[in-house]
């Protein structure tokens, strides 16, 4: 009887259209950690968007797993050479040679020239599951966050979306992240950024600048940078444990 019922339901079009969709995750959460800044990056492609000047309509997005620093570039086409140039210009030349790159199974990520380039530089490539492209969840959330930030700033100027990218990236880099309690800017450049709000509403840092004391303060920031990053890593680990416990309770 159960077998006949399953056969009947699977053959019924209305039953399939209106069936309840399971929302609970099927597998337990796998946490991804990075031992130090700019060692492990997640990279993905967002788009296509409305075509802009130069026929750009895609975004290459990369995020560092330690500092949560986001890099993005507008491109017209997605090829292995574009990915290679993006990684060289925006990651290697700006920060350091990464140890690991996490991406989906797109042909531009696993085929030459990017595959050969990574092997020559001893960069390990990891690929998300074919069935679960959302495995690289950090980059997926970065993509969604960038898209939402751009849409929020556009209003009726929807064709000028590429001009808003730098503003949205700046906002993300100077925003305190709930997972580690620090901003990506401070974990990257050893000090907090001066944001436009501090000019409109002056703070002690902007009104009482003394070059001698400022240099001393920057030197202290350098001395305390490792401790700050260690504290950030501890807070991040605690946040991941809570997230894992909540996620796995719904599996």
Image: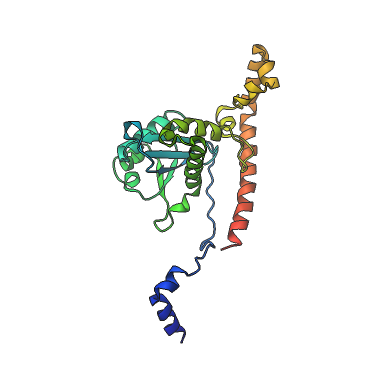
Towards the viewer: 82 or 58: 58
Residue 64 in sight? no
In the figure, is residue 54 to the left or right of 40?
A: left
Image label count:
0
Residue 5 lies, in percent from the top left, at 45, 82
- How is the model colour-coded? rainbow
Q: Which residue is drawn at 31% across and 40% down?
A: 80
Rendered position, 195 above or below 9: above
Q: Residue at x 53, y 36 (%)?
A: 37
Q: Who's the residue at 61% across and 62% down the image?
A: 249
Name above or below for residue 169 compared with residue 9.
above
Task: For the C terminus, give its image quadrant.
Answer: bottom right
In which quarter of the view is residue 85 placed? top left
Q: Is residue 116 visible?
A: yes
Up the image or down, 22 lies above or below 243; here it is below
In this view, 55 is above or below 141: above
Compared across the picture, whether 22 is left or right of 120 comes to right
Pick the front one: 112 or 19: 19
Q: Name the residue at 66% across, 15% down.
A: 209
Q: Is residue 193 left or right of residue 46?
A: right
The image position of residue 11, as x and y in percent, is: 38, 76
Q: Is residue 213 left or right of residue 173?
A: right
Q: Residue 179: horizontal and vertical position, in percent?
A: 61, 43
Quadrant in the picture for residue 100: top left
x%, y% of residue 142? Answer: 50, 42
């Amino acid at each position: 009887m159960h077998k006949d019922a399953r056969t009947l339901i699977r053959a019924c079009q209305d039953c399939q259209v209106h069936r309840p969709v399971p929302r609970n995750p099927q597998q337990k959460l796998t946490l991804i950690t990075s031992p130090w800044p700019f060692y492990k990056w997640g990279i993905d492609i967002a788009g296509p968007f409305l075509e802009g000047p130069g026929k750009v309509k895609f975004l290459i997005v990369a995020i560092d797993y330690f500092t949560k620093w986001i890099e993005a570039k507008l491109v017209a086409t997605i090829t292995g050479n574009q990915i290679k140039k993006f990684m060289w210009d925006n990651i290697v030349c700006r920060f350091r040679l990464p140890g690991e790159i996490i991406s989906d199974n797109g042909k531009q990520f696993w085929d030459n020239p990017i595959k050969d380039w990574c092997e020559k530089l001893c960069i390990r490539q990891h690929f998300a599951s074919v069935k679960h492209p959302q495995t690289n969840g950090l980059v997926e959330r970065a993509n969604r966050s960038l898209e939402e930030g751009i849409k929020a700033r556009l209003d009726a100027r929807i064709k000028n979306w590429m001009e808003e990218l730098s503003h949205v990236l700046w906002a993300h880099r100077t925003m305190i992240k709930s997972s580690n309690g620090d901003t990506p800017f401070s974990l990257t450049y050893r000090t907090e950024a001066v944001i436009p709000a501090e000019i409109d509403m002056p703070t002690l840092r902007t009104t009482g600048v003394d070059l001698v004391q400022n240099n001393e303060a920057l030197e202290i920031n350098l001395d305390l940078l490792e401790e700050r990053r260690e504290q950030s890593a501890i807070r991040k680990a605690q946040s991941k444990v809570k997230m894992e416990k909540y996620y796995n309770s719904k599996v």
